[in-house]
Amino acid sequence: MTTSLTQYAHPEALVDADWLEKHLNDNDVRVIESNEDILLYDMDHIPGAVHIDWRTDLQDHVIRDYVAPDKFARLCSRHGITPDTTCVFYGDKANWWACYALWAFRLFGHDRVKVLNGGRDKWKADGREMTREVPKYPQTNYLVPARRYDKEIRAFADEALAQSKAGKPLIDVRSPGEYKGEITHMAEYPQEGVLRGGHIPGAKSVPWKTATNEDGTFKSARDLAKIYLEQCGLKPGTDTVVYCRIGERSSHTWFVLTYLLGLENVRNYDGSWTEWGNKVGAPIEKNA
């Protein structure tokens, strides 16, 4: 059953394939593909889409952090993006990594952002046009952001600890096995050196994919409200922190809570379990 996008708190943040096909050639729209599998873009992509690699383009290569504002500005300029460009993100894995790239753009204050509902897989499944042609856009001069919005949409370990001690909402979006401490990484994924398993005390388990349908589209606003507001107990106006392994799956949940349900004060703890599970003295629970 097709879900109407108008039901969401911010329907402008989610577009369907019909909308995107009509706007592929708009000068003020840039389609951005961001995947877990970085080879997919070269195989084929939506016409006019540029590729942003979450690892090489958005993360600092020396310290564990995101790139500085000047490097973000150069990245956008290279792809013909200005602060007024509407960026439409899509990718594999039900837009899991696309939401990560979107969250990083919001971290630098770029607020004209949208997600293609269903992402790459649904676009292809529907038989829509794909290409191998890599577009070239005139370089722009993206103004260097004055700052990153770490305080507004990002949480750090000390803030996650304070959230836990205060009994405020913490959402662990990893798999149930990771949450329980039975495994320290996703099934079929490599071990990344985490020394301890479990979850932050007080965190509730709501796997990120709970928010999606089988075709990768987002569930209806009613279903999302039942999951996060009724069952999980989140409330408007309450500070909420989401986390996963490195902040990528939790970016998906951050998008759901912020844009589809309209909750304010939602922050993504991107240090997540690869930091918490290795942090000396960090409290851990393993109960189900």
Image: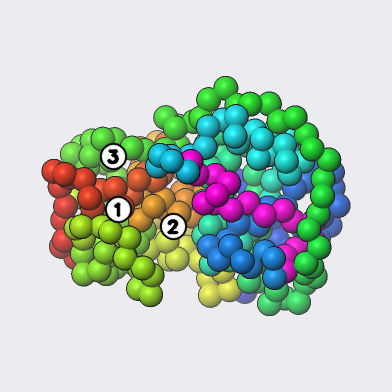
Q: Residues within 10 Å of mark 2 (few under 14, many from 20)?
A: many
Can the viewer see residue 281 in this picture? yes
Q: Distance between the residues labelled 3 and 2?
A: 17 Å
Based on the displayed image, in which of its 4 quarters is residue 190 positioned?
bottom left
Amino acid type, callout 2: Arg
Can the viewer see residue 266 in this picture? no
Query: Tag on residue 157?
Result: 3
Q: How crowded is mark 3: few (under 14 residues within 10 Å), some or many (20 or more)?
A: some
221, 67: nearer the viewer? 67
Query: Tag on residue 249?
Result: 2
Amino acid type, callout 1: Trp
Q: Main structural element of the magenta stretch: helix, strand or loop? A: loop
Q: Give the mark nearest the N terminus, 1 or 2.
A: 2
Extreme residue in the front direction:
62
Q: Residue 220 location, x and y as percent?
A: 54, 62
Amino acid type, callout 3: Ala
Q: Residue at the spot x=29%, y=35% of the render? A: 159
Q: Residue 162 location, x and y as percent?
A: 23, 35
In the rendered image, residue 109 lying in the magenta stretch gets the answer no
Q: Horizontally, is 143 left or right of 205 in the view? A: right
Based on the displayed image, in which of its 4 quarters is residue 139 positioned?
top right
The magenta stretch is 44-60
Q: Which residue matches tag 1?
A: 273
| Quarter occupied by the C terminus | bottom left
Q: Residue at the spot x=68%, y=26% of the render? A: 143
All told, the count of numbered labels is 3
Does residue 202 lie above or below 153 as drawn?
Answer: below
